[in-house]
Image (tube, rainbow, N blue to C red):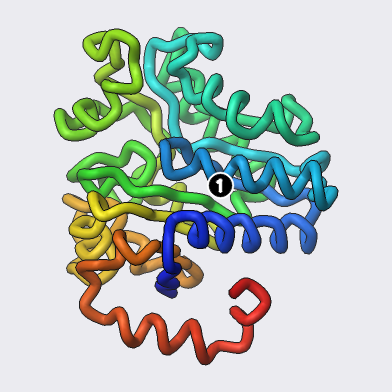
Amino acid sequence: MEVIIQKNAEAAAQLTAALIGDALRLKPNLVLGLATGRTMERLYGILAEKHQREGLDFSLAVTFNLDEYIGLPAADPNSYRSYMNHYLFNNINIDPRNTHLPNGTAHDLDAGCRDYEETIRDHGGIDLQLLGIGVTGHIGFNEPLSAMRSRTRCKALTPGTIAQNAPQFEKPEDMPKRAITMGVGTILDSRRCIMLVTGESKADIVAKAVEGPITSMISATALQLHERCTVIVDEDAAAKLTQQDYYRWIFQNEPEWEPYR
């Protein structure tokens, strides 16, 4: 695991966008795993700017989102499909047929989860998986006690997750209590992971995820097992990390990071 501390949220988002852009230029048909949430909004704006100003080409890219609420149709403004269309897909030249999210309104949800896994496999697996982290330490909606080998499945949301996300709904009580999520095992199968985290409210959980013991109670700790995981945080989110000086030293002395500073 690599930890990169940036001075603020904007710098963290810019670095993450640079890494995604480089991966896409290196492999135009990149299979990209995507995340949602407030942290990602600026990142997606930067990627859209790179497309419009620098010609960053998404025409051959394929995307798979981590999760989707159960019971919300794609057209619902609170669905993650609507989120992705608004913040990214409608602003770049990606083929909509190559953008995949779990189907939260499928007649057979379990079969839909199996189909999602199969579709990922059919595309050769995920090259680069983008991640955020929830207040419970979840990646995707892999809430506490999610198995490290879990695959795409339906998952009940914790009260903490519901409290965090409900204000995004016009009527908070309308927020679904269940979601479909890629499993921890599905995420670990990706060739590279980048977790972007900003803000002081995430400092405690970032420290547990990065420096704490690996536990199913905090699914993000599973990323410690990934052979190529980069955690990008701003100063506020890094505040509780005990090895900050070491992480800064590595970043400053590793030549491969120079183009992105």
Looking at the rendered image, the quarter that the C terminus falls into is bottom right
Q: Could you tell me which residue is drawn at 60 percent across and 25 percent down?
A: 86
Q: Where is residue 203 drawn, in percent x and y?
A: 24, 59
Q: Quadrant of residue 1?
A: bottom left
Left or right: where 163 falls relative to 181: left
Q: Where is residue 140 drawn, in percent x and y?
A: 38, 41
Quick check: can you spot residue 82?
yes
Pick the residue in front: 216 or 237.
237
Q: Where is residue 129 drawn, in percent x and y?
A: 53, 52
For the residue labelled by badge 1, is the local secondary structure a helix, a strand or a loop? helix
Question: Which residue extends farthest bottom?
Answer: 253
Pick the residue in front: 27 or 16.
16
Q: Could you tell me which residue is drawn at 15 percent across and 29 percent down?
A: 159
Relative to 137, does residue 16 appear above or below in the rendering? Answer: below
Q: Could you tell me which residue is drawn at 45 percent across and 47 percent down?
A: 186
Residue at which label 1 appears: 43
Relative to 76, does residue 125 appear above or below in the rendering? Answer: below
Pick the residue in front: 44 or 144.
44
Quick check: can you spot residue 191?
no
Left or right: where 219 falls relative to 120: left
Task: Identify residue type, mark 1.
Answer: Leu
Relative to 185, does residue 246 appear above or below in the rendering? Answer: below
Q: Residues within 10 Å of mark 1 (few under 14, many from 20)?
A: many
Q: Where is residue 230 drawn, in percent x and y?
A: 47, 67
Pick the residue in front: 183 or 256.
256
Q: Could you tell me which residue is drawn at 29 percent across and 15 percent down?
A: 175
Q: Quadrant of residue 93?
A: top right
Say how many tags the image has. Answer: 1
Relative to 79, does residue 76 appear above or below in the rendering? Answer: above
